[in-house]
Image (cartoon, rainbow, N blue to C red):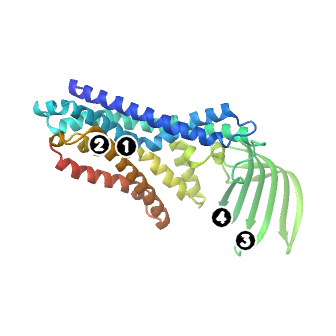
Amino acid sequence: MSILERYIAGNLIRSWFVVLLVLGTVFGLIALIQELDRSHGGYGVVQVFNFTLMSLPHQLLDLMPVIALLGTILALAGLDKSNELTIICCSGVPLWKLLKAIAIPTAGLMILLWLCLEFVSAPLFQSAQQLKSSTRNDNPEVLPNGGVWSKYRNRYIHIGKMRNGKIPGNIDLFRFDDEGELILAISAHTARVSPDRRWQFMGVRKKALIDGEFQTSHAEQLEIDNLWSQAELPTLSLSSQSMRLSVLYEYIAYLKANEQAHEDYEFTFWQRLTLPVTVAAMILLATPISASIGSRRDSNLGYNMAFGALIGIFFFLGSQITYAVGQLLHVNYLLTTLSPVAAVLLFSAFMLRRMRW
């Protein structure tokens, strides 16, 4: 890496960190104040502070495109204001070398974001949700939102509790015939789960339709196959936002194999996976906005930052509208998530062609 590349990379990294610190402080305080209004019982000030701190990386990842955009504008507009970009241009450095110097720290940031998505933000957000659930609820074993439902062909299963993320409880299983008539209902207190997706129901009450009448029987144990595996059990109490990328990918495969609704999980997966690409596109867009030498006398840092913030707001709103329309019209997930990024890249290419260097 040349001296110029190191210098530009250093300015970019410092500016990204400054914007990250400022927005992290602002949004962290807002989240803390909102969460304090929901505190009660065992969910006190200390627990609220810990929850906010652990969920902040997840929130900042959603803001990373805007952070990268504003940070890049701050760095390059600062160099432009001090005439350093003018000196670089007049010394014969071509535009592609400037873009290369910007691309090097951008590639490092993209790798860092993928690592954070897998190993930092998701585990911390999962821990934050578990902390909130265990301190706010009287019975932390009860799964949120009324428990978890699953469908396999004509069989439906509901789980109401999950102890330690591994032991299911309050289990109900229903089976219907091809005409939609209930023919079997099973309730169990708990279950032992084997790695091959076989469950051993414990404390079983069974109602079966025999000769047009339901007959009730009881059993200590009953084996049911093709349910969740041991590795998938901890994900049942999680939202899609708190899953690692690898776990989310495996869970989507399970839902598809069992013909269950997977659209929301698939959109979340592709949004998370393409987030670093979105960040890179926003950095590219910031370059012609803040580093156009010919407009140096007419531009100022405040104007560039305001323009960048406006672009960030429009990008966020446009992305949300695109995702909602894509889900409504059942458009391909990858196409839907990459459409806003493609629009930014096209606009960036147009701006770069008009850029004075």
What residue sits right under mark 2 in the picture? 304
- Kind of residue at disc 2: Asn
Of marks 1 and 3, the one in the foreground: 1
> Which mark is first along the chain, 4 or 2?
4
- Kind of residue at disc 1: Val
| Above or below, 258 relative to 3 | below
| Above or below, 92 relative to 272 | above
Secondary structure found at label 2? helix
- Answer with the quarter of the image where residue 342 lies: bottom left
Pointer 4: residues within 10 angstroms few (<14), some, or many (20+)?
few
What residue sits right under mark 3 in the picture? 177
Placement of the N terminus among the 4 image quadrants: top left
- Kind of residue at disc 3: Asp
Q: Which mark is residue 153?
A: 4
Residue 78 place in picture, x, y as percent: 27, 33
Pointer 2: residues within 10 angstroms few (<14), some, or many (20+)?
some
Residue 7 place in picture, x, y as percent: 25, 26
Mark 1 to mark 2: distance in Å?
18 Å
Asked if disc 2 and disc 4 are in contact, CB closer than 8 Å, the reply is no
Of marks 1 and 4, the one in the foreground: 1
Asked if disc 1 and disc 2 are in contact, CB closer than 8 Å, the reply is no
